[in-house]
Image (spheres, rainbow, N blue to C red):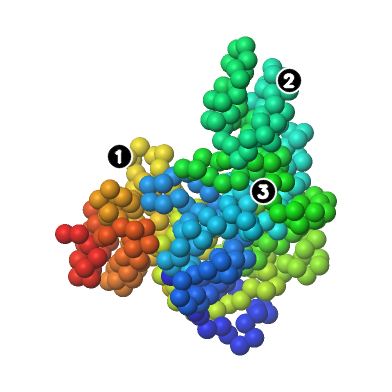
Amino acid sequence: MAAVTETLPGARPAKTAFSLAEVRRIALAAQGFADRRPVGVPDLRSLRRVLARIGLLQIDSVNVLVRSHYLPLFSRLGAYPAALLERAAYRRPRALFEYWAHEASLLPVAVQPLLRWRMARGEHEAWGSMQRLQAERPGFVEDVLAMVAERGPVGAGELEEERPRKAGPWWDWHDTKAALEWLFFTGRVSTARRRNFERLYDLTERVIPAEVLAVPTPEPGEAHRELIRLAARALGVATEKDLRDYFRLSPGQARPAVATLVEDGALIPVTVEGWRNQAYLHPEARIPRRISAAALLSPFDSLVWERSRTERIWGFRYRLEIYTPAPKRVHGYYVLPFLLRDDLVARVDLKADRKAGVLLVQAAHLEPGRPAGDVAVALAAQLTELAGWLGLDAVGPPVAGDLAPHLGPVLVATGAAVR
């Protein structure tokens, strides 16, 4: 839940040295946690406002709770209709599109021209499996593209199953999928929609709005500068590494862009308490007087996805333990940080038991030095809202963790928990 904050008179920072407390508030405001929640049911305007701040939503396949790209909007807007995001991404007039930005991502369609340099690079820098495929099966990729043109929107499995078989394993699923992914990376096909999370591909000109495709392609250096500018706006204050990580730029792409933006006054060099590296402030960054927020964060939320930055700002060491063997996990399988006001105060391992209609709190851990009682009350409210948004009837009392003895009774007392 994001709540309104009060900003200092004149709000734009004029100084060039900042404390960590100030940087926390700058970063949270840049990420939309200082914005007032919409009155009533959030609509497309609300979604656009969030995307204007954070720039993109990272997509991930894990569905133990909910697909990760749905959570950042919930964290900032509250219980919004999930169909709102699906409509923006996969229906006309299309507001978002899928591409590789910070990993697989949903982005505003207006950003598409800024990523064409990456698409063009893919044409000349095919990865190993594609080099093999093109060498061993000349014309195969073009055959796949022709099938998409004829059949799209279509998934890899449908192409593998429904084309006439040729001699040998010509149309096996793995090669078909590889060809589609390469065509996607190079911008020749796009995701028209998803079916049970499977991408259904179509020709890009049938997915991306014509007015966006008509925008002239910027030269790569210009595109890199604009992507760094978008990252700086989304982060508020950041190091060069933070900035380039946002859209996965290389040091060779990011450093000249940062230097030019500094020269143009579009980035302001600043110092931050405890940071060894040079930091940069976006000229429109604001320092709210306080942040009044309470939000559960996806592991892939843009506020925390750069783990070293999260640790620098909040002292919050965060590692996703999905691939860690269960006996060696410290905090759990799918752990969400909990933001309270301007601090990351706890972490909870959550699972949606859809069959039982229960949000399972498998573990709840308090960050050192945080007030357990206040955190438990605020976290219980957020878990209750999350369960309702997911269509679940109750919250299961926490099973493990040092916050569990405080959180469990609050959930029971509020009637949210199953006993």
Q: Are marks 1 and 3 in contact (CB under 8 Å)?
A: no
Identify the residue position indicated by label 1 in the image: 327
Q: Decide which of tag 1 and tag 3 comes sooner along the chain.
A: 3
Image x and y of residue 383, in percent: 33, 63
Give me the C-alpha separation between circle 1 and circle 2.
48 Å
The secondary element bearing badge 3 is classed as: loop
Note whether residue 310 is visible.
Answer: no
Labels 1, 3: front one: 3
Residue at x-position 34% and y-position 58%: 391
The secondary element bearing badge 2 is classed as: loop
| Disc number placed over residue 138 in the picture, else none | 2
| Disc number placed over residue 3 in the picture, else none | none
Image x and y of residue 200, in percent: 57, 40
Q: Amino acid at mark 1?
A: Pro
Residue at x-position 51% and y-position 40%: 198
Q: In which quadrant will I find the C terminus?
A: bottom left
Q: Is residue 64 left or right of residue 20?
A: left
Crowd class of label 3 (few under 14; some 14 to 19; many from 20; radius 10 Å): many
Identify the residue position indicated by label 3 in the image: 207
Crowd class of label 1 (few under 14; some 14 to 19; many from 20; radius 10 Å): few
Give me the C-alpha separation between circle 2 and circle 3.
27 Å
Q: Amino acid at mark 3?
A: Val
Image x and y of residue 283, in percent: 70, 73
Give me the C-alpha separation between circle 1 and circle 3.
45 Å
Image x and y of residue 91, in percent: 59, 54
The secondary element bearing badge 1 is classed as: helix
